[in-house]
Amino acid sequence: MAIPGTDPEPGSMLDLVLTSLDEDQAQEVICIPLQGKSSMADYMVIASGRSTRQVAAIAQKLAERLKQGGFGNPRVEGLPAADWVLIDAADVVVHLFRPEVRSFYNLERMWGFGDAAATAVGQA
C-alpha cells in the first residue's frame, strides 16, 4: 500500500499494519510520521471502523498479525468497549476509533499535524 511521503519498506512493521488495516476495510486511514518529532514511536496510524464490532475485529486481527509477523506481542487497550482501541507495537502506534469518537478526540489536530502533514492512505 503506497502512502505519499511515507514509503514503507516491504515486510516492515508499518507495511504490515497498513496492509492489515486495508484488508480489514478500515476507513480514513492516516499515517503520521513521528521520527524526529517524538520518541514514543516512529509512526502513528489512525483509522476508523464502522462499528464497535468492526473496531474490535480489526484490532484483534492486527495484534495477531503483528505477533505472527515476528514483531512481538503488542499491547492492546480499549478492547472491551471498542470505541477507541490503542495498539502499541513500539515503533508503530495504532489508534482505531468508531467515527463519532474519532471526530470528538481529533488526534490529528491534537498532534498539530493538520490535514497537510498527516497523510491519508490511498489518496495521492
Image (cartoon, rainbow, N blue to C red):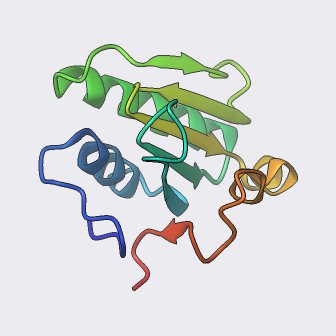
Q: Which residue lies furthest to the left in this view?
A: 10
Q: In which quarter of the image is the N terminus?
A: bottom left
User: In this rendering, is residue 60 above or below 72?
Assistant: below
Q: Quadrant of the C terminus?
A: bottom left
Determine whether, in the image, residue 73 is placed left or right of residue 47: left
User: In this rendering, is residue 84 above or below 76?
Assistant: below
* Residue under the image location 52 percent in, 30 percent down: 40
Residue nearest the observer in this picture, 38 or 20 = 38
* Residue under the image location 87 percent in, 51 percent down: 104
Q: Where is residue 48 in the image (x, y as percent from the top left)?
A: 61, 53
* Residue under the image location 46 percent in, 47 percent down: 36
Q: Position of residue 24 (x, y in %)?
A: 40, 50
Q: Residue furthest bottom?
A: 124
Total labels drawn: 0
Residue nearest the observer in this picture, 122 or 44 = 44
Residue nearest the observer in this picture, 57 or 20 = 20
Q: Position of residue 60 (x, y in %)?
A: 44, 27
Determine whether, in the image, residue 53 is placed left or right of residue 59: right
Q: Where is residue 72 in the image (x, y as percent from the top left)?
A: 27, 16
Q: Residue furthest right?
A: 104
* Residue under the image location 27 percent in, 30 percent down: 65
